[in-house]
Structure formats: C-alpha cells, structure tokens
Image (tube, grey):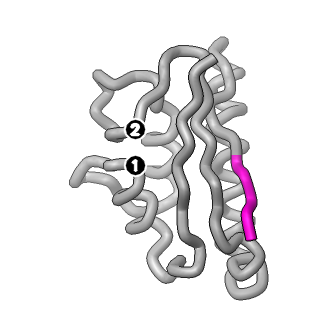
C-alpha cells in the first residue's frame, strides 16, 4: 500500500486553511472552511479531480503529521478537534461510498 507523509507545522496555525492549502496544493477556488477541506481531502486518490497536488494511488493512505501538536492542543483545542472530526468524516464518507479510508493523523511534539 502506498502512503504519502505531509507535515503540517501547527506552531503557525493562525490560518489553518492557508497551511493546508499550501501543503496540499488546493486549487485557487478552495473555500477555506472545513466543508471545502473535506471535499478536497476526499479525493486525494483522484488526480483528475483537480482538488490537490498531493495524491496517492487507490487504497493508499495520506498521513498528516501534525508537528507541534501539543502546542496546538493547548492554544487552539477547537482547531485540533475540528481537524480530527473532519479527517474522521472524510474516512467515514469514503467507506460509506464503498471506498477505503484515506487519511491518517499523526501527532508529533
């Protein structure tokens, strides 16, 4: 199974959607909200969808490594919760549609 590791520096989580848009290469029309994040992340194994520059093959996993996750937990627990819930929703949505989970969150200090 192919996997792709994407590191996100949470110490600079002032604009989380900007961080993700840059790290994943979201399109210019990215809505910078959690619904748009879910839409982009749900198609990481579909390069033709044009929703990100990061891709894995069907059945692959994208590991999002949250660097400085403990600092984010202390300073913005709401943001960390939204990220966890959104990643879980992406995986649930895909499984419900008969596909496989595609996201894994990793927490680093």
Who is closer to the viewer here, 39 or 57? 57
Residue found 77% across the figure and 85% down from its top: 74
Q: What percent of the width, then of the height, locates residue 106?
A: 72, 52
Q: How many labels sit on residues? A: 2
Q: Secondary structure at mark 2?
A: loop
**60 left or right, relative to 18:** right
Q: Earlier in the sequence, mark 1 or mark 2?
A: 1
Q: Are marks 1 and 2 in contact (CB under 8 Å)?
A: yes
According to the picture, the residue beneath numbered tag 1 turns out to be 24
Residue found 51% across the figure and 80% down from its top: 12
Q: Image quarter for residue 3?
A: top right
Q: Image quarter for residue 49?
A: top left
Report the span colored magenta.
105-109
Q: Residues within 10 Å of mark 1 (few under 14, many from 20)?
A: some
Query: If the image is split into quadrants, where does the C terminus sit?
Result: bottom right
Farthest residue, direction bottom: 75
Quote the CA–CA distance across marks 1 and 2.
5 Å
Residue 33 drawn above or below residue 99 = below
Residue found 42% across the figure and 30% down from its top: 55
Q: Which mark is residue 54?
A: 2
């Amino acid at each position: 199974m192919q996997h792709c590791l994407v590191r996100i520096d949470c110490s600079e989580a002032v604009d989380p959607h900007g961080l993700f848009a840059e790290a994943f290469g979201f399109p210019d029309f990215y809505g910078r909200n959690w619904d748009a994040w879910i839409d982009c992340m749900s198609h990481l194994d579909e390069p033709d969808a044009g929703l990100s520059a990061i891709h894995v093959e069907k059945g692959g996993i994208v590991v999002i490594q949250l660097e400085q996750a403990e600092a984010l937990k202390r300073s913005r627990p709401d943001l960390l919760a939204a990220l966890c819930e959104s990643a879980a929703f992406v995986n649930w949505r895909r499984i419900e549609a008969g596909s496989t989970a595609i996201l894994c969150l990793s927490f680093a200090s």
